[in-house]
Amino acid sequence: MTDDYTPEKVAGICEIPEQDLLTAVQWMANTPKMVSTVLQGFYQSVEATAAYSLVNSVHLILGAIGKPGAGPLLMAGQPSAMSNRETGAGGSYPGYRNPHNEVQMRDLCDKWNIAYNDFHPEVPKDILTMMEQAERGEIEFMWVMGTNPLVSLPNQNRSERILKRLFLVVQDPFIDTETVSTADIYLPASMWGEKQGCVTNADRSVNLLMQAVDPPGEARSDFDIFVEIAGRIGFKDKDGAPLISFKKPEDAFNEWRRVAAGRPCDYSGMTYDLLLEMGAIRWPCNEKYPKGCARLYENLHFWTEAERCQTYGVDFLTSRVTAKDEYIDPKGKAFLRPAAWRQPPNPVTTEYPYLLITGRVVYHFHTRTKTARSSVLNGHAPEPYIEIHPLDAEKMQISTGDLVEVLSPNGRWEGVAMVVDTVRPGDVFIPFHYGKGVHAANQHTWYARDAVSHQPHLKSSPVAVKRLSFGAPQGWLLERLEELNGHSIMPFAARQYEGTFNREI
């Protein structure tokens, strides 16, 4: 397959000079160490799994893995995202277990003391599949914990219509989030510093966070709420005992140590006392690694054996799962999975000629639930804005500070323009942090998603852009523009300022 992708062809696809591509290849081929990291630009795409598989393949081919200064570092958008994936809360099973492997599922049932014959393992539904099922009336109840999907989900107007159809319970520290406004029941939850528990970093470091203060009012920790509701529902194990018998967070952690034992994320050797003593421990932590393991795959042995692997493989294009009897057991060796390049979905059209990219800015986290309350952080980016390349801005007669409208088949956005060359011609960028209605970038995105990971395709939506009115840039916008230009106003930006200030508003 590599023969089909000559440097000339790849450079054309990526819209970069061929010589730059060749230089990057030479650097990677000749360096003794290489660390790569990718963020939401990779994950939030219909090609997310294929793209990251190729990143892994480059490291495998170069031998840049399992040794100091080498390896792919997967970064997530949430502080405890790694914890969610390990425990199965990200749409899988605890300990990276394979739902299509009876041995692994029976092992899980034994650890939970539930009868395997009463257990029906299936691949958990991703959030967009659940939203589509709710839209069809197949789901009537949804419980949202610690997130603000009315802002973060794609196609916001559609998502809002669906959420309003459901009986919705929202568990959140803040009563004024956008999703809480659609809730039938609100459960006030405590925040970091008001509860105890562990989080895992992207480098597998586990930290124990201790409670510093009591939560205010009637707020309770997510753990306490979860345990009480489980008790009220009456979940039982096969002996009739409560399935969820935790009294304190350490009880849940000790159960997790048992469930994770023998899996890649083995916590069996960790204790609260050891975490407090060491400050942080990288899994696996067990008899072989009593103080944790600095790095994985030093012996180039991977979790690919038929009875140990998390998956037998999934087709990148169709999401068809490889059956166990089709699986070719590499016995600990790694796979190299080729992937052909495809055009992204929803290409630009004559009616919608620009490609919208959504993303984050350094001053805000996710849906601004907390950062908007900080006057220091919010002061640097208090309003939504759109980044437009100077060539496009010139064609549309848009200057920095002008009020701009963005239209798509899904909705309408408006905000101030920032003319800057941090985007490519033909692309525009809008931070997704800002609420709902005309300020929400995610009203333009779609429910398209990766066939394997089911991550939404949030990074390219066709839109139309036009100026609504002239405007003088506010101070925060000028400061933000200087930051994007490397703390120096570029000549085109200076011209934009001059033109804006000299116009009659």
Image: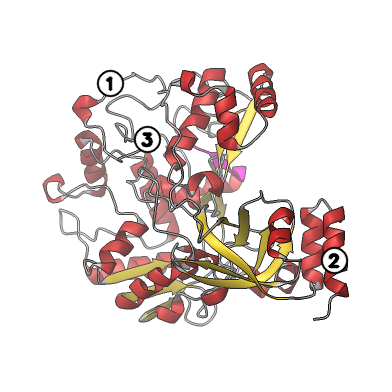
Q: Looking at the image, can residue 279 be seen? A: yes
Type of amino acid under label 2: Tyr
- Residue hosting label 1: 328
- Residue hosting label 2: 497
- Write the residue at 70% across / 66% down: 417
Q: Say whether residue 285 is magenta.
A: yes
- The residue carrying pointer 3 sits among few (fewer than 14), some (14 to 19) or many (20 or more) residues within 10 Å by Cα, namely many
- The residue carrying pointer 1 sits among few (fewer than 14), some (14 to 19) or many (20 or more) residues within 10 Å by Cα, namely few
Q: Considering the numbered disc 2 on the image, is that residue within a helix, a strand or a loop?
A: helix
Q: Position of residue 176 (x, y in %)?
A: 52, 80
Is residue 218 toward the left or the right of residue 130 in the image? right
Is residue 144 toward the left or the right of residue 40 in the image? left
Q: Is residue 238 above or below residue 109?
A: below
Type of amino acid under label 3: Arg
The foreground one among 66 and 259 is: 66
Q: Say whether residue 66 is magenta.
A: no
Q: Are marks 2 and 3 in contact (CB under 8 Å)?
A: no
- Residue hosting label 3: 263
Q: How many marks?
A: 3
Please report whichever mark, 2 or 1, sits nearer to the chain's N-terminal start. Answer: 1
Q: Quadrant of residue 419?
A: bottom right
